[in-house]
Amino acid sequence: MQARLIALLVLAAGLLGGCGYNQIQAVDEQVTAAWSEVLNQYQRRADLIPNLVQVVQGYAAHEKEVLTRVTEARASVAGLKATPELINDPEAFAKFQAAQAQLSGALSRLLAVAENYPNLKADGAFRDLQAQVEGTENRIAVARNRYIKAVQDYNVTVRMFPSNLTAMLFGYKTKSSFSVEDEKALATPPAIRFDTAPAAK
């Protein structure tokens, strides 16, 4: 009896391995890891924003509308539950992306304010934060590209025969990814390099 049970378990393991179950597990883990890195980089950007707002506010306090928009956009992003399950919910994923795009736009406008304030452009703290934001935007682009590739591999696996049968059996569905429009919007990072030379009088 015990030998028969062991034989059945070995047979089941062989069938699951041969029908793509293990491959689905591997690519699903890759998607989860890639998504975690996307969230990590978005969080890094969100963490930089309060310091950036504070420095800009010291020089350009009357740019209240721009400062308010950045703060509100950051709060909107922070209010979303960015869990690993988000990538399995297309509607929640779209909302998350819209909030991140809104924050990117507000951040670009905030950094553009420095053009009108030569003293702000020359401030060491501002330049340091500016460089960190720029580096973070690049990291976000890299993390998103890795996520796109991981989702592509996963989606192909759960849609191809015979692993699609296993995916259907165990409830694995395709995952959301960034759209072409998202990628076009990020093709050129926000213009955040400024000439620090004093303005001509």
Image (tube, rainbow, N blue to C red):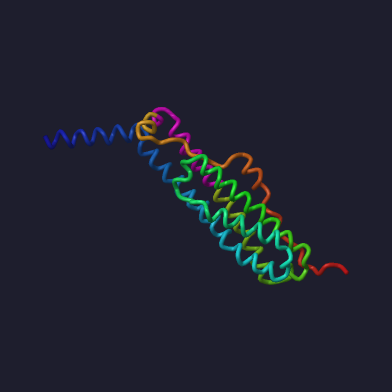
Q: Is residue 196 left or right of residue 154?
A: right
Q: Is residue 132 left or right of residue 11?
A: right
Question: 84 above or below 110?
Answer: above
- Considering depth in this image, is 195 or 58 the residue closer to the camera? 58
Q: Is residue 174 left or right of residue 124?
A: left
The quadrant in which residue 185 appears is: top right
Q: Quadrant of the C terminus?
A: bottom right
Please tell me whether residue 162 belongs to the stretch shown in magenta.
Answer: yes
Percent coordinates x, y for residue 184 in the rendering: 66, 43
- Considering depth in this image, is 23 or 120 the residue closer to the camera? 120
Question: 32 above or below 69?
Answer: above
Question: 91 above or below 40?
Answer: above
Magenta span main SS: helix
Percent coordinates x, y for residue 135 in the rendering: 62, 59
Q: Which residues are magenta?
A: 145-164
Q: Quadrant of the N terminus?
A: top left
- Considering depth in this image, is 26 or 83 the residue closer to the camera? 83
Residue furthest right in the image:
201
Question: 147 above or below 198?
Answer: above
Percent coordinates x, y for residue 40 in the rendering: 51, 56
Q: Residue at x 67, y 69 (%)?
A: 55
Please tell me whether residue 157 belongs to the stretch shown in magenta.
Answer: yes
Q: Residue at x 60, y 65 (%)?
A: 50
Percent coordinates x, y for residue 12 in the rendering: 26, 34
Q: Residue at x 64, y 40 (%)?
A: 181
Please tell me how many numbered marks the rendered image carries: 0
